[in-house]
Image: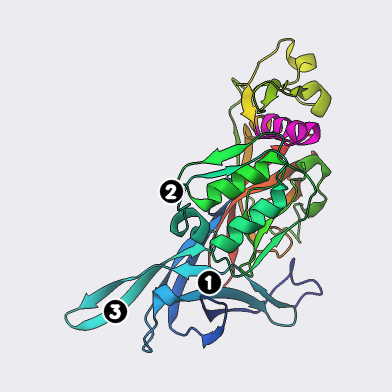
């Protein structure tokens, strides 16, 4: 094996750990014929997939979770998510079951689909937002969660109707203080943490050509920039009689080297104003508007490629890509993978020009 298994050969295997819904260990799942996982940083439920199973020991699928692991001999093993299992579909040949197809969803499914507000919810101005987020996670019976504490409070009341999914409540609150939307980590922990602009994130990996390249030489460069905004305004939601905070972001200030900035274009393109933004502070409003504008500019230039699985490169990671003399920076927006020998990830990246 190469001194660095990431860029050399690797001896690998896949394991499937079973847990109860309370994360109590239930042993290993044998009989998995195939497993495919898909993730998107834009999705409410970031990770999901399916597996094909032909084992002999009965599995009570709706009452267990499955955690696929990727193991590399001499290097380590890594979880690839913790998933709820939908009641399966089984193919039969006469009376003999051939294979069971099981759909998989990460644990934010509990917030998105299984836990809803039993009555209208109204939170007054001054509510500590992270405390409210924690309360919603606990009410949804989320077994494991990690919320980064913050003293930020609501600048105006927020309200939701009965029947609203708790994930929307959590994500609305998270957006009010400039946090990421809730997501589940590979161990099944639901996290809520401050959003970090891509320009401020460290580089997880640099993809370069040559003998140690870990990506396919065939890749796609995609661009659609006809209506990319270079200016965007936001207005804070407040109670009656209170003057809202306002803020206008420009690409010239956020990313002066952008080809869509006014300095490069010579004209303004205004994005749709963020009205009634649930921002507790001026800093949170700035974070939300800056983030929306940079995302709007970053979505137009994508790279689609295949590469070897790397533990450092996850959804939201920033990577550098240098297929030629020019080095470009991207955020990882989507990943898909079939868990089979020679684990390869089909990735979609969004360019970060700052």
284 relative position to 295: left or right: right
Pointer 3 residue: 98
Q: Which residues are magenta?
A: 278-295
Q: Please give the label number shown on residue 123.
A: none
Question: Residue 209: image x %, image y %?
Answer: 75, 52
User: Colour scheme used in the picture?
Assistant: rainbow
Q: Residue at x 48, y 50 (%)?
A: 165
At which x and y percent is residue 310? Answer: 70, 63
User: For the residues carrying marks 3 and 1, which lies nearer the camera in this image?
Assistant: 3
Q: Estimate how packed mark 2 is, as few (under 14), some (14 to 19) or many (20 or more) residues with alpha carbons within 10 Å.
A: few
- Residue 70 position by quadrant: bottom right
Could you tell me which secondary element the residue under label 3 belongs to?
Answer: strand
Pointer 3 or 1: first along the chain? 3
Looking at the rendering, which quadrant does residue 25 occupy? bottom right
Residue 284's x, y, as percent?
76, 36
Helix, strand or loop for disc 1:
loop
Look at the numbered discs 3 and 2 and tell me whether their residues touch, using CB distance below 8 Å: no
- Mark 3 / mark 2, whichever is N-terminal: 3
Q: Nearer the viewer, mark 2 or mark 1?
A: 2
Q: Quadrant of residue 12?
A: bottom right
Please name the residue that numbered disc 2 is placed on.
Answer: 163
């Amino acid at each position: 094996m190469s001194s660095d298994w990431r860029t050399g050969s690797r001896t690998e295997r896949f394991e499937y750990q079973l847990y109860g819904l309370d994360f109590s260990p239930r042993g290993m799942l044998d009989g998995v014929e195939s497993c495919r996982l898909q993730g998107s940083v834009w999705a409410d439920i970031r990770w999901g997939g399916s597996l094909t199973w032909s084992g002999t020991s009965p599995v009570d699928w709706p009452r267990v979770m499955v955690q696929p692991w990727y193991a590399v001999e001499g290097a380590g093993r890594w979880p690839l998510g913790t998933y709820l299992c939908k009641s399966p579909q089984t193919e039969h040949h006469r009376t003999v079951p051939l294979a069971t197809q099981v759909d998989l969803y990460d644990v934010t499914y509990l917030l998105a689909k299984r836990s809803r507000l039993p009555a209208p919810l109204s939170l007054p101005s001054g509510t500590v937002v992270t405390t409210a987020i924690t309360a919603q996670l606990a009410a949804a019976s989320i077994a494991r969660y990690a919320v980064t504490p913050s003293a930020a409070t609501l600048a105006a009341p927020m309200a939701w109707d009965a029947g609203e999914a708790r994930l929307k409540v959590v994500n609305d609150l998270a957006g009010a203080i400039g946090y990421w939307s809730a997501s589940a980590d590979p161990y099944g922990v639901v996290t809520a943490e401050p959003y970090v602009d891509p320009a401020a994130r460290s580089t997880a990996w640099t993809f370069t050509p040559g003998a140690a390249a870990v990506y396919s030489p065939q890749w796609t460069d995609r661009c659609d920039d006809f209506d990319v905004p270079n200016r965007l305004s936001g207005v804070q939601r407040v109670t009656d009689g209170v003057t809202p905070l306002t803020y206008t972001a420009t690409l010239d200030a956020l990313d002066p080297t952008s080809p869509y900035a006014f300095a490069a274009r010579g004209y303004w393109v205004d994005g749709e104003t963020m009205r009634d933004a649930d921002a507790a502070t001026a800093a949170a409003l700035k974070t939300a508007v800056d983030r929306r504008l940079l995302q709007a500019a970053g979505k137009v230039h994508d790279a689609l490629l295949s590469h070897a699985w790397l533990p450092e490169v996850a959804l939201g990671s920033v990577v550098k890509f240098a297929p030629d003399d020019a080095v470009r920076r991207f955020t990882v927006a989507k990943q898909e993978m079939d868990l089979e020998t020679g684990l390869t990830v089909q990735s979609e990246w969004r360019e970060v020009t700052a």
